C-alpha cells in the first residue's frame, strides 16, 4: 500500500493566524511593517494581509478577534508564547526605529548572545523578532 504525500494532495499553507483583541488594528500594524496589503476585511473578527501583488487566497497573515484574549507572557508565566514571527532586516537599529514608531515595544528579555536578533512585542503582546 502506498502513502499519499502532501504534494500529491496539493496541501499548502494558506495563512498563519494570530489571535488578538482587535483584528483590524493588529492587521494594520503588520501591514505597515511589512508593506503588505489588507485583503480579507469582511468583518471585525477576521482580517488578512498579503504581500503586494497577491490577492485573497494567497499565503499571508490573518488576525482573529478573540473576546477574552490574553497576551502571551514570555519568556515564562502562565500564558505561553506558543509561536512567534521572525522578521528579517538589513539593519537592526533602523528596523527598531520602524517597529517602535509603529507601536511595538522592545522586550526586557533579550536572549541573543551575539546580538543577531532583538525581541519585541506587537501591540497585542505577541513576541516577534527582528533578525539580521
Image: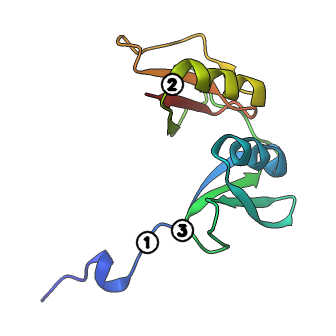
Q: What element does badge 1 sit on? A: loop
10, above or below 43, in the image: below
Q: Position of residue 79 (x, y in %)?
A: 61, 30
Nearest the eye: 57 or 1: 57
Q: Is residue 4 visible?
A: yes
Horizontal side, residue 80 vs residue 20: left or right: left
Tell me, for residue 14, which label it has, or none.
3
Identified at 50% across, 33% down, the residue is 89
73, above or below 25, in the image: above
Give the class, few, some or many, for how many residues have Cα within 10 Å of label 1's Cα (few <14, many ≥20): few
Q: Report how far apart the C-alphas of labels 3 and 2 lie in the structure.
A: 30 Å
Q: Position of residue 20 (x, y in %)?
A: 74, 44
Q: Which residue is mark 1?
A: 12
Dividing the picture into quarters, in which one does residue 9 lie?
A: bottom left
Front of the two marks 1 and 2: 2
Tell me, for residue 91, which label it has, or none.
2
Amino acid at each position: 500500500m502506498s502513502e499519499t504525500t502532501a504534494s500529491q494532495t496539493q496541501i499548502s499553507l494558506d495563512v498563519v493566524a494570530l489571535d488578538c483583541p482587535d483584528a483590524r488594528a493588529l492587521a494594520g500594524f503588520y501591514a505597515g511593517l511589512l508593506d503588505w496589503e489588507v485583503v480579507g476585511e469582511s468583518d471585525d473578527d477576521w482580517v488578512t494581509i498579503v504581500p503586494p501583488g497577491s490577492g485573497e487566497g494567497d499565503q499571508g497573515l490573518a488576525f482573529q478577534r478573540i473576546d477574552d484574549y490574553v497576551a502571551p507572557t514570555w519568556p515564562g508565566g502562565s500564558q505561553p508564547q506558543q509561536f512567534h514571527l521572525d522578521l528579517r532586516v538589513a539593519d537592526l537599529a533602523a528596523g527598531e526605529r520602524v517597529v517602535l514608531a509603529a507601536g511595538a515595544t522592545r522586550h526586557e528579555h533579550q536572549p541573543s548572545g551575539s546580538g543577531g536578533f532583538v525581541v519585541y512585542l506587537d501591540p497585542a503582546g505577541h513576541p516577534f523578532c527582528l533578525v539580521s
